[in-house]
Image (cartoon, rainbow, N blue to C red):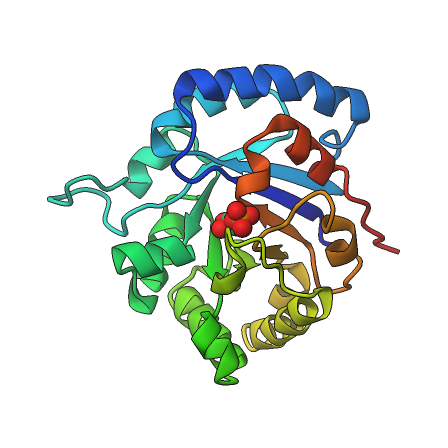
């Protein structure tokens, strides 16, 4: 059984001090409601700005909650001003890194080929990549959703280490930060397409790989989305920034029977 996985993407929000304050507030609440106590059933991960990684690691040490970075380069070191080295992220004991977020693709020119190199580099240092895929509004309206997300999936996984884990997030670009959420059926259909494409890497890969939905997930729509059978969790931007709304999201019911 795949765990239900709720991931926060803070994007470029919060300082190390904010990070410590956030965890000081939310950790006792997680403890009280028990959502973070069994990671084989429900797993929570925070993708924080690189400058907050140490604060997140210090705050979350000894818990079952994961943390990760939002980007990494594919080389270990070199003349790549401003980039994060996968080897250094590994030295900082970072368990997860996002790859191919639509903001990286659209604003920073990240290509399909680069996502493949990044997944390879992260696997080589023992970090689990969370590969994001998703179509733009124009691509959806042109009926190209499935073609685009399968292309992004295949490119991202093309150089992976087959013995290592990946996590996938389907984030339709038109639903990110817009308040426009995909209908639960639209999301489930895209997840089913991705699951089928994952089976080309082996049925065991398709069965074991969590596929998260991202794009305007909020406490008032999460329960409906989570009811869909192919949806294994969420990748949450805006609603993860406040502890109350993220705590509510972490308590979304999921029937795994
Ligand atoms: P929002 O939840 O703010 O739409 O952001 C989604 C996202 O991009 C998560 O990676």
Left or right of 216? Residue 223 is right
Near-viewer residue (218 or 108): 218
Near-viewer residue (242 or 86): 242
What residue is drawn where x is 69% and y is 66%? 183
Near-viewer residue (67 or 200): 67
Which quarter of the image is occupied by the C terminus? bottom right
Q: Going by the picture, which residue comes out furthest to the front? A: 179
Residue 176 position (above or below residue 192): above
Residue 124 position (above or below residue 30): below
Left or right of 86? Residue 182 is right
Q: Going by the picture, which residue comes out furthest to the left? A: 79
Near-viewer residue (25 or 80): 25
Report x, y in % for residue 241. 54, 33
The answer to whether one can see residue 254 in this image is yes
What residue is drawn where x is 58% and y is 42%? 7
Which quarter of the image is occupied by the N terminus? bottom right
Q: Going by the picture, which residue comes out furthest to the right? A: 257
Report x, y in % for residue 238. 54, 41
What residue is drawn where x is 81% and y is 50%? 254
Q: Quadrant of residue 188?
A: bottom right
Left or right of 13? Residue 246 is right
Q: Quadrant of residue 198?
A: bottom right
What residue is drawn where x is 65% and y is 72%? 203
Residue 147 position (above or below residue 16): below
How many callouts does the rendering have? 0
The answer to whether one can see residue 100 in this image is no
Report x, y in % for residue 206. 63, 67
Report x, y in % for residue 148. 46, 76
């Amino acid at each position: 059984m795949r765990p239900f996985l709720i991931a926060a993407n803070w994007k470029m929000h919060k300082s190390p001090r904010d990070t410590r304050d956030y965890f000081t507030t939310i950790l006792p609440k997680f403890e009280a409601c028990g959502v973070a106590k069994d990671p084989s059933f429900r797993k929570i991960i925070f993708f924080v700005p690189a400058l907050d990684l140490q604060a997140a690691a210090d705050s979350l040490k000894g818990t079952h909650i994961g943390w990760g970075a939002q980007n990494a380069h594919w080389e270990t070191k070199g003349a790549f001003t401003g980039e994060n080295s996968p080897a250094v992220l590994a030295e900082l004991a970072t368990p997860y890194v996002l790859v191919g977020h639509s903001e990286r693709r659209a604003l920073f020119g990240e290509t399909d080929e680069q996502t493949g190199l990044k997944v390879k580099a992260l696997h080589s240092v023992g970090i689990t990549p969370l590969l994001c895929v998703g179509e733009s509004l124009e691509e959806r309206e042109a009926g190209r959703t499935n073609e685009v997300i399968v292309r992004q999936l295949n490119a991202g996984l093309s150089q992976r280490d087959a013995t290592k884990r990946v996590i996938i997030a389907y984030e339709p670009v038109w639903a990110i930060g817009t308040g426009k959420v995909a209908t639960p059926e639209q999301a489930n259909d895209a997840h089913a397409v991705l699951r089928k494409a994952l089976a080309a890497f082996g049925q065991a890969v398709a069965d074991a790989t969590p596929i998260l939905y991202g794009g305007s997930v909020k406490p008032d729509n999460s329960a409906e989305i989570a009811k869909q059978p192919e949806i294994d969790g969420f990748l949450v931007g805006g609603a993860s920034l406040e502890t109350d709304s993220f705590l509510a999201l972490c308590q979304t019911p999921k029937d795994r029977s």
